[in-house]
Amino acid sequence: LAGGTIAAAGTLGALIPPSVILVIYAIMTESFILDLFVAAIGPAVLAIALQMATLAIVTARNPALAPPGARYSRSERLEALVAAAPTLVFLVVIIGGMYGGVFTVNEAAAVGAILSIVFALIRGRLTWARFLDCLVEAGRNTGMIYLIIFGAEMMGYFVTITGAPQAFTSF
């Protein structure tokens, strides 16, 4: 049940903004990224609701699949909330800023990068070595995304010049 839940929820990453998949799709289709983000809210909420309903039904029918977890004290829950506060602030600033019209998607990316660096510095987890590793990894990911886009464009061009769509239509 836990593995299936995680696998099913993992697909939400493609819907819930800020989604890299939506950004790539927007670039390839020359659509506005923010429009796709707004359009993804409905399906994402629906998917979340259906997954929660499914879990509620399955665990109601067989409670042994999801035994109750340990109870935490109020102070432990407050401590966890404080630890999660930077992430919540990050989400509110980025998502709220885009949907509120405070900044564009590109500006939101820049604000997100700056906030990430600030939070890492505050927590004392950012060293020069880690910062350089992050830059290298970002460069690799960007290169891979552009290779995917380039490959898709080349394939589209190849399919067009071979006349495959017309052949399939006439078939």
Image: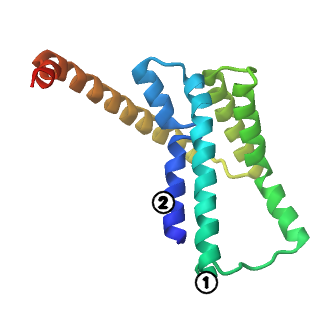
Horizontally, residue 121 falls left or right of residue 44, namely right
- Nearer to us in this view, 4 or 98: 4
Residue 99: x %, y % from top left: 71, 27
Residue 123: x %, y % from top left: 75, 51
Instruction: Give the crowd class for mark 2: few <14, some 14-19, many >=20 residues within 10 Å.
Output: few
Q: Residue at x 56, y 47 (%)?
A: 129
Amino acid at dot 2: Ala
Residue 140: x %, y % from top left: 41, 38
Q: Residue at x 40, y 23 (%)?
A: 28
> Where is mark 2, residue-wise?
7
> Where is mark 1, residue-wise?
64
Quadrant position of residue 80: bottom right
Amino acid at dot 1: Ala
Q: Dot 1 lies on which element?
A: helix
Residue 141: x %, y % from top left: 43, 38
Question: How did the renderer colour the structure?
Answer: rainbow
Q: In the picture shown, does residue 81 fall above or below 142?
A: below
> How far apart are labels 2 and 1 at the CA level?
20 Å
Q: Residue at x 58, y 71 (%)?
A: 58
